Amino acid sequence: MLGSGRNKDFAMDTEKRLQKVLSRRNLRMTTERQEILEAVSRMQNHFTVSDLIRQLKSNGGTAGRSTVYRAIPHLIEAKIIRRASMSCSKEEQRYEGINSLHHHDHLTCEMCGEIVEFEDKEIERLQRQVAQKYGYRLTRHFLELRGICKKCQDKIIEEAVGV
Amino acid sequence: MLGSGRNKDFAMDTEKRLQKVLSRRNLRMTTERQEILEAVSRMQNHFTVSDLIRQLKSNGGTAGRSTVYRAIPHLIEAKIIRRASMSCSKEEQRYEGINSLHHHDHLTCEMCGEIVEFEDKEIERLQRQVAQKYGYRLTRHFLELRGICKKCQDKIIEEAVGV
DNA sequence: TTTAATGCAAACGATTTGCAGCGAA
DNA sequence: TTCGCTGCAAATCGTTTGCATTAAA
């Protein structure tokens, strides 16, 4: 039941999907929310709320900061964006657009901040297996690997050896 | 008995490790930091800074909130505690004591908040494999599965069916 | 003695909220 | 005409920081 329904949702364009989520709760599609959608569609990689607002303003948008914040839960529910990093508390939350069914997790370099996106079906299968083992129905997962990328490893070695 | 004996070992062991981390940076072991260690050793599961302070105060400690916050990075560096949850944005950060080398991840119920700790060597092997594939040296990972536990699933069904 | 550590209160910064006017349905 | 939506400013709240004082080493 979930499968084909979800595919259909993804085929719908983002405005329609947001519309659907909104009307399900008797909420309204406004010009501000359209501006926000437009800005999201223009964002390339990961972005913060501040990034999004900058994009929105530079495109003539007038929506305010709190309006953007108020829109985010709906955008997430409509699967238009998702949280992109589990970064710890105080940092500004990062988001990313979802433009396909292609799910991925992140591998972050702790020195330079480079982010590699990866997908591992086997890890996801094992996650479902773990949830099942404890009687849980899995709704989502957060996986972020952190490490040191090749370049930064080289940099460390250079500094140590002095070459 | 066993309990207090373990606490003592934990306390002795941890004090040494903290000492080492501190002196490496020319920092000092103070009575407040000992109080905090003591409180950490008394915490059972996951805890917030507020929980920790409550424990500390109830045990006669006098260390203030900012002192606890200032101690946390050192406790983490000494591998005495670690972050326990990827809690999103505003929630108070959760920590947990590390009393053995036994590593685990978390499976959280999104309705009742129950947390199951699990360990999956195979998932960890695959994570290392992913990091290697991109030339990264893995330093750590954050994995949190979220879902609905069996009890809450039953509750949902009861409410829907009206039994 | 030196200088890190402490408690307090004020500051921070991302996010949320109260409110009075505005606008979609 | 409804109510939900908006911008604004003020409020939250976990966390950090400045400062004068205290206390390890």
Image (cartoon, coloured by chain):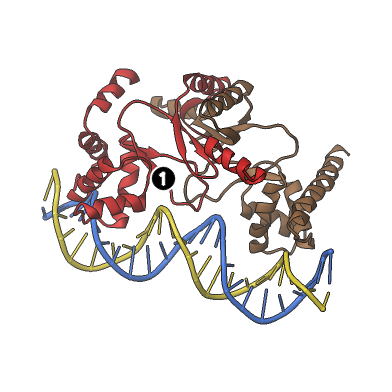
Chain colours: A red, B brown, C yellow, D blue
Q: Position of residue B137 (x, y in %)?
A: 59, 33
Q: Amino acid at mark 1?
A: Arg
- Measured as percent of width and height from the top left, residue A95 is found at 38, 42
Q: Position of residue A70 (x, y in %)?
A: 32, 50
Residue A65 placement, left or right of B110: left
Relative height, residue A117 to residue A132 (above, below): below
Query: Quick one: label 1, few (<14), some, or many (20+) residues within 10 Å?
Result: some
Question: What residue did someone put label 1 on?
Answer: A94
Question: In this orientation, which residue lies closer to the viewer: A96 or B40?
Answer: A96
* Name of the residue lying farthest toward the front: A163
| Horizontal side of residue A128 vs B19, given as left or right | left
The chain letter under disc 1 is A
Image point (29%, 22%), residue name: A7
Q: Quadrant of the N terminus of chain B?
A: top right
Q: Residue B78, can we see it? A: yes
Residue A143 location, x and y as percent? 51, 33
